[in-house]
Image: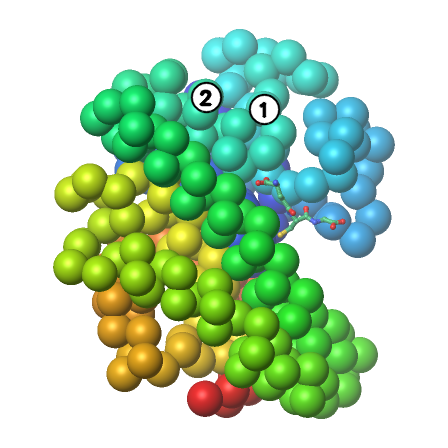
């Protein structure tokens, strides 16, 4: 009997954020898959934005809205308080910086990876068709580099994004960067040494290993061969 349920799909980088946090604090949880192509009414009730993940804390409520939190960032705030996790820095400025990196990874980076690389590779594969390589390569070569550059510079001489400790900023960045490894390669380590070192460090954390194993098995059924965008 666990205290938590994660509703979602492991291949979602936002679900990965939640699983990484839960693993970090050592909380056991059940996982309930949600069909995001046709979300059932009970799920829309707890996620009116029609997004995964949602977390349920069963000690608060076992049915309906009570006990649920939607949105990976809101879930992280909840879990931080619930477990005194130490993933939001040691002072006000660090907390603000962490929230900023999380926001930037969750929006600009996630949107660009999702729309410009993930969709052109995965969506055709659902219909047994080859990837839209032209679109994926344009995203890879033109849209992603300015965002990667920002994180590369932010990680200069540092193991983690904020202070000298693992934080929600690292979880958020790692969740999006590791999404690439499910369908293609990572960007060139010669161009982005800090970002690649960071991505590998974060991907080795147990919560990431657990999620990426499940996500890889699921996506591997659709994308039979990873696409080389290097
Ligand atoms: N801000 C949300 C974003 C979540 C999100 O965009 N999830 C995607 C999956 S990766 C989703 O639920 N998509 C469903 C849809 O677009 O219909 C969070 O942090 O949880």
| Label 1, residues with CA under 10 Å away: few <14, some 14-19, many ≥20 | many
- The answer to whether any part of residue 85 appears in the image is no
- Which quadrant is home to the C terminus? bottom left
The structure residue drawn at horizontal position 59% and vertical position 39%, both measured from the top left corner, is 53
Residue contact at pointers 2 and 1, CB within 8 angstroms: yes
- Residue 41: in sight, yes or no? yes
Is the CB–ligand 1 distance for label 1 below 8 Å?
no
Secondary structure state at the residue bearing disc 2: helix
Q: Residues within 10 Å of mark 2 (few under 14, many from 20)?
A: some
Q: How many marks?
A: 2
Q: Does the Cβ of the disc 2 residue fall within 8 Å of ligand 1?
A: no
91 or 187, which lies in front?
91
Coloring scheme used = rainbow
The percent coordinates of residue 133 (x first, y second) are: 66, 88
| Residue 33: mark in rendering | none
Front one among 142 and 216: 142
Residue at point 36%, 24% (across, down): 80
Badge 1 element: strand
Work out whether residue 13 or residue 61 is closer to the camera in this orientation and state it.
13
Q: Give how far apart the Cα atoms at labels 2 and 1 are.
A: 8 Å
The residue at which mark 2 appears reads as 78
Place of residue 181 in the rendered image (x, y in percent of width and height, measured from the top left): 44, 72
Reading the image, the residue beneath label 1 is 69
């Amino acid at each position: 009997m666990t205290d938590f349920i994660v509703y979602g799909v492991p291949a979602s980088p936002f679900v990965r954020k939640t699983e990484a946090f839960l693993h970090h604090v050592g909380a056991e949880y059940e996982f309930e898959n949600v069909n995001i192509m046709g979300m059932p009414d009970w799920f829309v009730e707890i996620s009116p934005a029609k997004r995964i993940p949602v977390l349920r804390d069963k000690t608060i409520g076992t049915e309906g809205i009570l006990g649920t939190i939607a949105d990976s960032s809101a879930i992280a705030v909840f879990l931080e308080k619930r477990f005194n996790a130490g993933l939001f820095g040691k002072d006000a400025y660090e907390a603000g910086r962490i929230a900023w990196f999380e926001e930037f990874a969750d929006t600009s980076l996630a949107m660009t990876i999702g729309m410009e690389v993930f969709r052109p590779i995965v969506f055709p594969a659902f219909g047994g068709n080859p990837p839209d390589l032209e679109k994926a390569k344009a995203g890879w070569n033109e849209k992603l580099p300015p965002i990667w550059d920002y994180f590369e510079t932010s990680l200069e001489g540092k193991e983690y994004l904020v202070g000298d400790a693992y934080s929600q900023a690292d979880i958020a960045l790692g969740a999006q960067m590791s999404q690439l490894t499910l369908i293609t390669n990572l960007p060139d380590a010669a161009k982005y040494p800090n970002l690649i070192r960071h991505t590998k460090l974060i991907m080795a954390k147990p919560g990431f290993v657990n999620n990426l194993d499940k996500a890889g098995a699921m996506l591997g059924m659709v994308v039979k061969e990873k696409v080389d965008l290097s």
